[in-house]
Amino acid sequence: MAMSSALTDLYRYPIVQAPMAGGASCPQLAATVSEAGGLGFLAAGYKTPEAMYEEIKQLRGLTGRHFGVNLFMPQPSNADTAAVGAYRARLTGEAAWYETPLGDPDAGTDDAYDAKLAVLLDNPVPVVSFTFGCPTRAVLDAFAQAGTRTIVTVTSPVEAQTAQWAGADAVCVQGVEAGGHQGTYSNDPAVDGMGAGLGLLSLITLVREYVQIPIIAAGGIMRGSQIASALAAGAVAAQMGTAFLVCPESGANALHKQAMTDPLFGRTELTRAFSGRPARGLVNRFMREHGPHAPAAYPQLHHMTSGLRKAAAKAGDPQGMALWAGQGHRLARELPAGRLVETLATELDAARSELGLQSQRGAVS
């Protein structure tokens, strides 16, 4: 109980709506989840500091409950320029097809991190989480002094230990099943292995051996029974993205929502095709044709393909979009976000009761 006390006052149910960059995690979705008893999140990634602040103001106008904001950590400027140039040449046909220019790969690697920190420290929010690395102790201490709880996304026990040493209040343990970007600290093909990451339940168990701070579980969770399994493994809450992406309050593109349960998109894979970092999405034409050739260059490839993805969406062509999705995408339910939280909570209670009954039966036998 002591381990979970850093977070449990933030929500009624151990359900966290994942911060999904690109528009899905809008104020309406976050507010509805928080109002229903979960913990809603805004995604500041790819937004300007001003746009982030405006969304925070909108969210505060919709709910007085706790919520979080997610930041992307600055990335090293060490991409192979020759590899990036070769990939750009490969995409010239896509640019012609969608009648849009390719973006500038050198548009920046820090996602306005320092400016966003300044906004969040001047106007504290209940929770701030970090992806693609671990902040310095000075940054985490500053948030602690401001009364903000901090969460760092991790994909390995070593990353979790680094977050604990730096002073994070909790870690979000992301299994390889998760949709969207893998929140690894590094972007090294020799390390990430494109799919060689650990499954969620194994990762939770390992991380518990390394750290004493609370664990939030993320990766392929779509049902209350899966939340129960994550809690039984040692997590204090479950973070869910794909499950909320199809809700009417989600800001995701309608084509993206439809693809979640479309038989045409039957499986997911990790790819660098759209951003230069491993990310799990529905397999489509763009991923099949370009994924094997995409270099480890983030956010250079993200900037380069941004216009293509927007043009594909405008043209109504999901085959050219980044359809981020977790492995459980076929279990998506088009429910209002508040009702989804309530349904998940009911399923969680039922699963816990069943597990308790089974435990009692086992003791009797």
Image: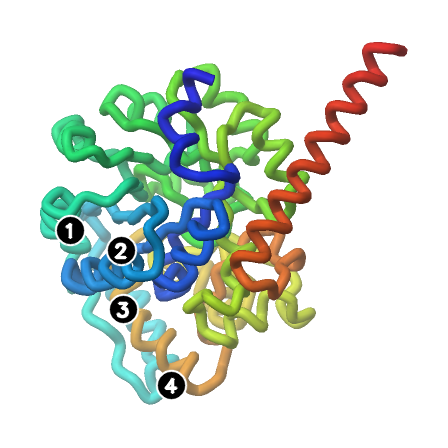
Q: Nearer the viewer, residue 207 or 142?
A: 142
Q: Residue at image x 13%, y 32%?
A: 142
**Residue 162 rendering spot, x and y as whole percentages:** 29, 24
Contact between marks 2 and 1 (CB within 8 A): the answer is yes
Whether residue 194 is visible, yes or no, is no
The circle on residue 116 is: 1
| Camera sees residue 244 | yes
Q: Which residue is mark 2?
A: 44
In x, y percent, where is residue 101?
Answer: 26, 81
Query: Going from the N terminus, do you reach mark 4 or mark 3 first?
Result: 4
Residue 98 numbered mark, or none: 4
Return the residue nearer the eye: 175 or 51.
Answer: 51
In 3D space, how far apart are the residues under numbered discs 3 and 2 (Cα atoms)? 20 Å
Task: Point out the residue furthest to the top here.
Answer: 364
Looking at numbered disc 4 in the image, what kind of residue is underneath it? Tyr
Disc 3, SS = helix
Q: Secondary structure at mark 2?
A: loop
- In the image, what residue type sits under mark 2? Ala
Q: Are marks 4 and 2 in contact (CB under 8 Å)?
A: no
Q: Is residue 226 above or below residue 249?
A: above
Bin the neighbour count of mark 3 within 10 Å (Cα to Cα): few under 14, some 14-19, many 20 and up: many
